[in-house]
Image (cartoon, rainbow, N blue to C red):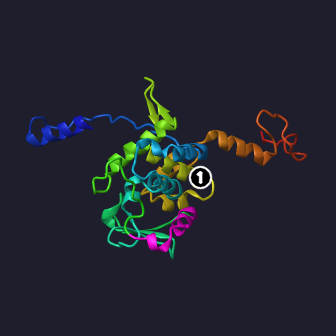
């Protein structure tokens, strides 16, 4: 991509007559992480006090919010109980109202809440539903809200303490659970419940290819298990329970 930019600039400057063709490298299907499991989520909740925050319960509340909502970390930290100028909660209709400048898609959006997230927010006493929904504090009280990148690093620190590895390079470098792996887990859970079209809306993906590529059908082992269950057999069984005629009566192929 850098070479293509340089060649285009050189053509405009008259240094070369035409822009040479540059073969662009193909992307990879490998995920940068993976959906964490419910057991791993519980371990991160348990280890949330490892970062030395003033109020570990606020971090546990944030982790639960990421788990049930599927929000990106930056979106979660912007979520407000009442301020409609940014991102705010509409519990009556179970919606998240997003102004164009407040999230990745850059357009006004009314996004459906996952039912578990709506129930979680309803459990917050009415008198506490003011200001930002999530208020995690660092180990120093600076009087300002945490930056998204700082919060992200602290969540990875929790993932490391809980020993939740989500990826590893060929060189052996380990990647520990991050906030985005919570979003992957959310997408994976709901991909087993709803169609890709509904999942796209729930996760606010611009392109359905993103939904299908990263969240639908990634767990091949689970798919194999479901296929076996549909036949009434178990893995390793070569004698499926079939009705008469399913295997021994093959269709006649004309010559």
Q: Position of residue 43 (x, y in %)?
A: 56, 43
**Most frequent secondary structure within the magenta stretch:** helix
Q: Position of residue 191 (x, y in %)?
A: 58, 53
Quarter that holds the C terminus: top right
* Label 1 residue SS: helix
Q: Is residue 51 visible?
A: yes
- Of residues 133 and 229, the one nearer the viewer is 133
Q: For the image shown, how many numbered marks are present on the structure?
A: 1
Residue projecting furthest to the top:
171
Q: Is residue 30 visible?
A: no
**Tag 1 residue:** 189
Where 12 falls versus 137 (above or below)?
Answer: above
- Of residues 175 and 107, the one nearer the viewer is 175
In percent of the image, x 42 and y 64: which residue is there? 133
Quarter that holds the N terminus: top left
- 45 in the magenta segment: no
Residue projecting furthest to the right:
244
Which segment did they paint magenta?
Answer: 115-130
Where 73 falls versus 84 (above or below)?
Answer: above
- Of residues 41 and 46, the one nearer the viewer is 46
Where 49 falls versus 94 (above or below)?
Answer: above
Crowd tier of the residue under label 1, counting other residues whose Cα lies within 10 Å: few below 14, some 14–19, many 20 or above: some
* 153 relative position to 201: left or right: left
- 121 in the magenta segment: yes
In percent of the image, x 45 and y 52: which residue is there? 59
Q: Position of residue 100 (x, y in %)?
A: 33, 66
* 169 relative position to 225: left or right: left
* 143 relative position to 161: left or right: left
* 223 relative position to 89: left or right: right
């Amino acid at each position: 991509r850098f070479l293509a930019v340089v060649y285009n600039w050189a053509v405009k400057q008259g240094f070369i007559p035409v822009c040479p063709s540059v073969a662009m490298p193909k992307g990879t299907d490998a995920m940068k992480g993976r959906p964490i499991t419910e057991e791993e989520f519980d371990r991160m909740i348990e280890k949330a006090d490892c970062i030395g925050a003033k109020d570990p319960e606020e971090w546990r509340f944030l982790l639960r919010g990421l788990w049930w909502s599927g929000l990106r970390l930056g979106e979660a930290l912007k979520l407000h109980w009442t301020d409609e100028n940014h991102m705010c909660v509409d519990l009556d209709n179970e919606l998240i109202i997003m102004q164009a400048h407040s999230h990745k898609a850059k357009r006004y959006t009314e996004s459906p809440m996952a039912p578990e997230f709506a129930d979680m927010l309803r459990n917050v006493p009415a008198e506490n539903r003011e200001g930002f929904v999530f208020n995690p504090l660092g180990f120093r009280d600076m009087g300002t809200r945490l930056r998204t990148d700082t919060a992200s690093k602290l969540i990875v620190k929790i993932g490391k303490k809980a020993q939740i590895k989500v990826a590893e390079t060929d060189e052996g470098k380990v990647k520990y659970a991050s906030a985005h792996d919570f979003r992957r887990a959310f997408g994976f859970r709901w991909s087993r419940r709803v169609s890709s079209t509904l999942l796209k809306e729930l996760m606010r993906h611009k392109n359905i290819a993103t939904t299908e590529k990263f969240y639908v059908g990634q767990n091949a082992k689970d798919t194999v298990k479901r296929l076996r269950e549909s036949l009434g057999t178990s893995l390793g069984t070569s004698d499926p329970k079939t009705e008469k005629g399913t295997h021994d009566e093959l269709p006649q192929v004309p010559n």
